[in-house]
Amino acid sequence: MKFGNLLKKELRELITFQAMIGMVFTMVLLIVMGQIMGGAMEEGFDTSTITLCNKDTSAFTEDVLTTIQESGHTTINFVDIQSEDYAAEMERLDLKNVVIIPEGFGDSVTVEKKPAQIQVVSQMQNGGFAGTMSTVSATDIISVIQDVCMDEVLLENYGLTEADIELIRDPLELVEYTTLNGKTSKVSVMELTAITMMQSMIAPFAIFFLLMMASQMIMTAISTEKIDKTLETLLSAPVSRLSVLGAKMVAAVISALLNAAFMIVGFVFYMLGMVGGAVEDITASAMAETTNLPIDASALESVTSLPQAMAELGLTLTPMSYVLFAVQLFLTLAIGLAISLILGAMATDIKSVQTLTMPIMIAVMIPFFITMFVDINEMTGVFKLIAYAIPFTHTYTALTNLMNGEMMLFWGGLAYQLVFFVVCMFLAVKVFTTDKLFTMSVNFDAGMKKRGKKAVEE
C-alpha cells in the first residue's frame, strides 16, 4: 500500500493537466502537418489536370491535344496567355504553372522536320515544400506531350502502324522481382522500400522520444526534490528507499509511455498524411518513366500485393517477434532510467539538470541517426564496435534483426543490454541507499565562476 501511495504521488506530479495539454497539442500538430504536407505532395505529383495555352492551330497540334484528352488520364484546362509579360499573366489568371504551345509547333515537327519548342512558365513560391512541389506536375506533363507527339510523328511522317509504334516505344515488358534472404517475390523493390522505410522511421522515432521523455522526467523529479530538500523528508519516512526508487521509476515509465503514445499516434498520421495519399501517384510516375506510358490503377493491381510480397520475403513479424521487441524496448527504457537516476542525483540546480541530460541525449541520438541512414553491419570495424557499444543501438536495430531472421544479433544485443542494465541499476541502488545521494554533485556554475575569478586576477 505504501508503494501504491508513493506511485500515486509521483504520477500526480508527472501527469498534470498542463502535461496532458502538451501531449494532445503535439499529436494534433503532427496530424495537421501531415495533412498539409500530403496535400502538397499530391498536388505536386498530380498529372490528371494540366493548364495549357495553345497558340498553334495546326492539325498536328490539335490531334496531339485530342489524343491526350481522349486517353482519360489527363484533363486540359485551356487558358489564354495574352502577352509575354508572364509575371503579369500568371497573376491575372491566378496560375502556379502553365504549359505554352507556341505558334508553328506542328509545322516544326511535320514540315521542317526539327524539334518543336514548348514552353513552361512556373511561378516560384517563396520557400516551403509546397512551392517546390508545385512545378512537378507541369514538368511531368511535358513527358506525356512528348510521347504523344512521337506517336503522331511516327504515324504521320513514317507511315508506321500503331502496333509498330507500340513496339518501338516499349520493346521490353518489365517484370520486377525482389529478393531478400534467399527468398523471391514478384513485386517492385521500390514499393517494398517505401513501406519498410516508413516502418523503419516510426520505430526509431518512438524509441528516441520514449527514452528522452523518460530520462528527462526522472532526472527532473530527482533533482527537484533534492534541490527543494523534499527528498530528505521523503526518505526519512517509514518506507524503504528501494520503494521510493521503484515508485519514481514506474511513474516515469507510465508517464513516458503516455507521452510516447500521443507522439506515435501523431507521427503515424503525419507519415500517412504525407506519404499515403501520394504513394500510388509516386509509384505510377516511376512506372510511367520506365515504360514511357501513362499508368492507370489497373496496372498497379497486376503486381503481387504488398502484404503478400512482404509475407513471401519474410518481412512480416510474428506475435512472438513483437513480444521480444517489447522486452528489449522495456529493457532499454530501464537502462535510460537507471542512468538518469544517477545523473539526476548529481544535479544541484535546474541548469545542471539540462547539462547532465546531454550524455543521455548524445547516446540516444547517435544510434538514432545511424540506423535511419545506414546499415550498421556495413560499417567498418571500429565504427561498428562504437555503435554497438551504445546499449540503445540494439533496440533501434531489433525490428530489422527480427524481420530478417538475424536472431544471433538480436539475442546478443539483448544479453548486452541486460548486463548493462544490471550494472547501471547496481550503481543507482548504491547511490540511492547511501548518503552519496545527498553529497554527490556536479556544479558547473562553480567551475565557471572559479575560472572567471582566476582570469580576472591574472
Image: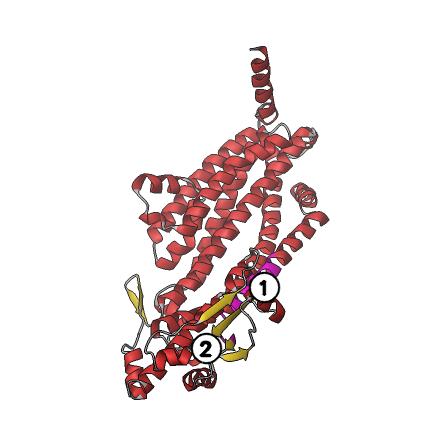
Q: What residue type is labelled 1?
A: Gln
Q: In which quarter of the image is the N terminus?
A: top right
Instruction: Give the quarter of the figure containing the C terminus.
Output: top right
Comparing labels 2 and 1, the label whose residue is closer to the camera: 2
Residue 373 % position (x, y): 41, 51
State the residue position of label 2: 103
Give yes or no for residue 195 being in the magenta stretch.
no
State the residue lying farthest toward the top.
457
**Does the magenta segment cover residue 45?**
yes
Q: Mostly what secondary structure, the magenta segment?
A: helix
Instruction: Using a 10 Å C-alpha cutoff, classify the residue at mark 1 as few (fewer than 14 neighbours), some (14 to 19) or many (20 or more).
Output: some
Q: What element carries label 2?
A: loop
Q: Mark 1 points at which residue?
A: 35
Mark 2: amino acid: Glu
Magenta segment: 30-52
Q: In which quarter of the image is residue 188?
A: bottom left
Can the viewer see residue 49 in this picture?
Answer: no
Dot 2: few (<14), some (14–19), or many (≥20) neighbours within 10 Å? some
Q: Distance between the residues labelled 2 and 1?
A: 41 Å
Chain-order first, disc 2 or disc 1: 1
Residue 375 visible in the shown view: yes
